[in-house]
Image: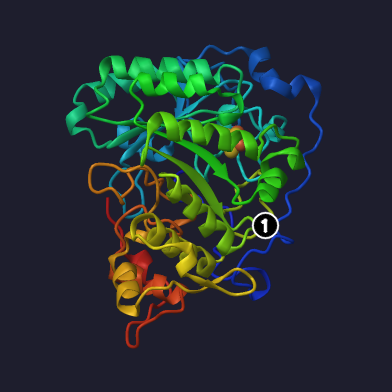
Amino acid sequence: MSCVKSENAAPAETGVGGLDHNPAALMEPRVPGKIDRDLKNGGRVKQNDVAPKGVYLPNNNIMTPHMRSPEYVQLSTAASITLGIMNGKMHRCACTRCLNLLLTYPEGCRANCAYCGLARHREADRDYADRNFIRVDWPAVPMDQIIDIVAKDPENSPFHRMCISMITHPRSDKDTVTVLKNWTDRIDPDAIPVSILSNPTTMTRGDVKVLKDLGADIFTCAIDAATPEIFDRTRGSGVQSPHTWKKYWEILMDARDIFGPQKFGAHIIVGMGETEYDSLNLVQQLVDIGGHSHMFCFFPEQGSLMDHLPATPRDQWRRVQLGRYLIDYGGRRVDDMTFDDAGRVTDFGIPQSELDMTIDSGIAFRTSGCPGKFADDISACDRPYGDSPPSNIASYPFQPEAVDIRKIRQQLDMERPGETYEEGDDLELVDG
Ligand code: SF4
């Protein structure tokens, strides 16, 4: 699946039954099924034991080689195209600014998060290195090959940041250190700063400190669920997964102490049954302790335990994106905003002229994440089409143009007279 063409669910302008939000009662994950003993823990890959040779492109019809970090890592499709190890073009993007790496093992991630394509319950269905994650494939590449390419000219690299995504695996803490060390031995972290997308469940405060000492710049925790109840339902005991809200917050607070203000943050997925108030209240909590939030729009990932559920209606998503931007970068507070009985934003608490300026600048609707070299509020991690198809963009991986702003205003029900959006206007624009 390329990141240009993958469209594994119909676009959702509005929610089920015309709802403008995904309510909690609707967003119930499926129960994970039973898995044969021989297929557990990467049994098929280990049994076949095919030696890896160079780059492995995910292919569910052949024997997946026996690849392991730290020698091997997986790369997002966008990073693989930008690095030149995969052919392809991305709708309206010339490249990605973040080199997203993912640790890899035949045993895969041992957690079972309901919205995630990498989750353990897929063992019977697909080998780990063949699974889709945030809508795209992740080729497996020898780490030395990646470093060789980037180390040729780090200052002029298209990448403004590198990020190591840990997974839940007994070797993940140790191998993250090795991958980071191998990288910083040859690439100055001032030229390309490094972020860690952590796996709090297996980590200690000492592990966080080691990563900082080795040159990591930003540390994030994918809390993902906006409330403890949704966390437990989607990635804790509700789906036989080991994560707890308490442990995630413990490591997040360690990161606050060790990495310092503006150098830590949390991922939040919008549309898994929380209210808009829940999401924005969490954004506010993160700002109040000195961190940032990186937001994702819920998308029913094919093969996940939530692939039967609707993507987040665009009006809910746009309101939360806008509110998040105002709190994270606009100096506004959740307490200044007004919410209705269903927790939806009804007033952002700022003058209309200021609201118009924020919407028209478009930055609030870009992908959020760790910054690159353009501006503090512009994410290097642009994750092209990681949370939506190009036909119905949730997080814009590029600066929205006038046509995009018209579409966003339509989704927010804030269209200006005489500036309406016609279906498909934005899809005519292609570059890269
Ligand atoms: S811990 Fe991360 S990679 Fe593993 S299943 Fe959960 S979201 Fe997916």
Dot 1 corresponds to which residue? Answer: 309
Residue 125 makes an appearance in the image: no
Q: Label 1: few (<14), some or many (≥20) within 10 Å?
A: many
From this view, report whether residue 432 is shown above or below residue 131.
below
Residue 148 appears at what percent x and percent y? 28, 18
Residue 324 place in picture, x, y as percent: 44, 59
Q: Within the displayed image, which quadrant is ligand 1 positioned in? A: top right
365 left or right of 197? left
Give above or below for 300 relative to 187.
below
Amino acid found under the numbered disc labelled 1: Leu
Q: Is label 1 in a helix, a strand or a loop? A: loop
Q: Nearer the viewer, residue 431 or 407?
A: 407
Number of labelled discs?
1
Q: Depth check: 222 or 305 in front?
A: 222
Question: What's the residue at 48%, 70% (across, down)?
Answer: 337
* Residue farthest along the bottom direction in this orientation: 417
Q: Ligand 1 closer than 8 Å to the CB at disc 1?
A: no
Q: Residue at x 49, y 65 (%)?
A: 335
Query: Measuring 57% from the left and 13% from the top, which residue is drawn there?
Result: 50
- Picture coordinates of residue 193, whole percent (x, y): 30, 31
Residue 18 can be seen, yes or no = yes
Q: Is residue 36 above or below residue 99?
A: above
Q: Look at 28% across and 42% down and name the residue there.
A: 372
Does 170 sit above or below residue 33?
above
- Residue 12 figure quarter: bottom right
The front one of 429 and 402 is 402
